[in-house]
Image (spheres, rainbow, N blue to C red):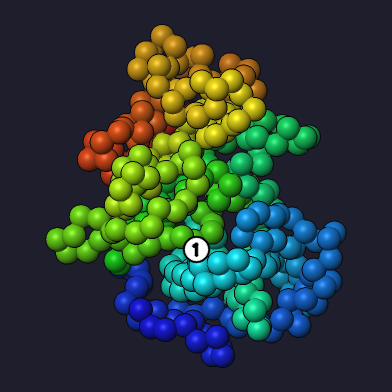
Amino acid sequence: MSCFCSRGKDVSVNNLGSKSNSKRATATSFSFRQLASATASFKEVNLIGEGGFGKVYKGRLPTGQVVAIKQLRLDGDGHQGHREFVTEVLLLSLLHHSNLVKLIGYCTHGVQRLLVYEYMPMGSLEHHLFDPNSQKKPLSWTTRMKIAVGAARGLQYLHCEAAPPVIYRDLKSANILLDKDFNPKLSDFGLAKLGPIGDNTHVSTRVMGTYGYCAPEYAMTGKLTLKSDIYSFGVVLLELITGRKAIDVSRKPREQTLVSWSRPFLSDRRKFSQMVDPLLEGKYPVRCLHCAIAVTAMCLQEQPNLRPPVGDIVAALEYLASESN
C-alpha cells in the first residue's frame, strides 16, 4: 500500500483493487470550512447518528448533493482512530460495489478527521429492527430477505472480487445502511483487514469488532479469516429472523446472548416457528423460513471450516428472496 498523505488532494492504493477493475481510484479532499458550511457548523439539528467513533451529520454540498459526514473522535487512543480513518479512506477509495456505501471524500484539518459518504435515507438495519420508539412499520419478511441478499453480495465482493481479499471484521446490523428502497450497503470499514494470501491461512491481529458478532475462534486466538465474517453474517441473519439483538442485557441472563439462546431452536425444526420475530405476525413462507434458518445455522458453526463460502450463501439467499416475493 502507498502511504496516505494528509496534505495531498487524493488518496490512492497501489496494491489493492478489484479483479474486474485495476484502475487507480481517488476520493475528494474537502476543507474543514466546506464541511462546516455543509452541516451549518455541525448543528445539533443535523445530527443523524452517534457512537464510540464520533458523530454523523446530514449535510448538503455546494453542488446540492445531500451527504452524511462522519466526524471521528480521536481523543484517547488517537493513533487507533487515525489508523481506522486511513484504512477506510484507502479501501473505499478503491473498492466500488452497489452494496458498499460510497465514500465521496474526506477531510484532514489539524486533529479533525472527517469522512463524507453518500446519504442513506432509511438509516441502519439496527434502527429498523430494534428501535422501540420507531413509528415505522416492521420490516416484512420479503424486505428482510432483500436486505440479507444485498449484504451477502457486498460481502461476496470483498471476499471474492477484491484482490487481495478484504476481511470486513465488523459486520453487524448497525453497519448495514439502507437506501430509500431498502437496498442495503455495508459501511464503516475502519477495522477491515487485507486477507491472507498465498499459503497463509489467516491474519493474526488484535481482537477488535463488536461483542456478540465476533467468531469464537477469532475472539480466542486473534486469528482472523474470511470465515470470521461468515460467522458475523450468521448473527445478522439471526437478528433478521428473530428480531432480537446480538447482545441484549435487558433480557433474562440465559437470553442475553442471541447465538447461545438460539442453539436449542436451530437444532430442532419443530421449534423453528418459536424463533421468529413476533412483529412478523406469522406472515412468512414456512418453507423459506426453514431454509433461512438452515443457512443461518451453517454460518454459525463453531468450526470455521464447516461454514459455507459466501458465494454459496448468496446463491441460497437469492433463491429464498425469489421464493418470498
Q: How many marks?
A: 1
Of the residues shown, which amino acid type is indicated by label 1?
Gly
Query: In the shown orientation, is residue 12 left or right of residue 10?
Result: left
- Where is residue 227? Give x, y as percent: 31, 46
Residue at left 80%, top 68%?
42
Out of 84 and 253, give the one closest to the viewer. 253
**Which residue reaches farthest top?**
270
Residue at left 14%, top 61%?
199
**Which residue reaches farthest left?**
199
Out of 79 and 240, give the one closest to the viewer. 79
Task: Decide: is 283 above or below 297.
Answer: above
- Where is residue 233? Give x, y as percent: 42, 41
**Which residue reaches farthest front?**
76
Task: Decide: is 2 above or below 221.
Answer: below
Residue at left 51%, top 67%?
80
Query: In the shown orientation, is residue 164 left or right of residue 319?
Result: left
Would residue 164 be seen by someone viewing this image from the given angle?
A: yes
Decide: few, some or many residues near mark 1? Use Cα within 10 Å; few <14, some 14-19, many ≥20: many
Task: Decide: is 39 above or below 177.
Answer: below
Would residue 89 be seen by someone viewing this image from the given angle?
A: no
Identify residue for label 1.
Answer: 190
Which quadrant is home to the N terminus? bottom left
Regarding mark 1 in the picture, which secondary structure is present there? loop
Out of 34 and 323, give the one closest to the viewer. 34
Query: In the shown orientation, is residue 157 left or right of residue 76?
Result: left
Residue at left 42%, top 17%?
265
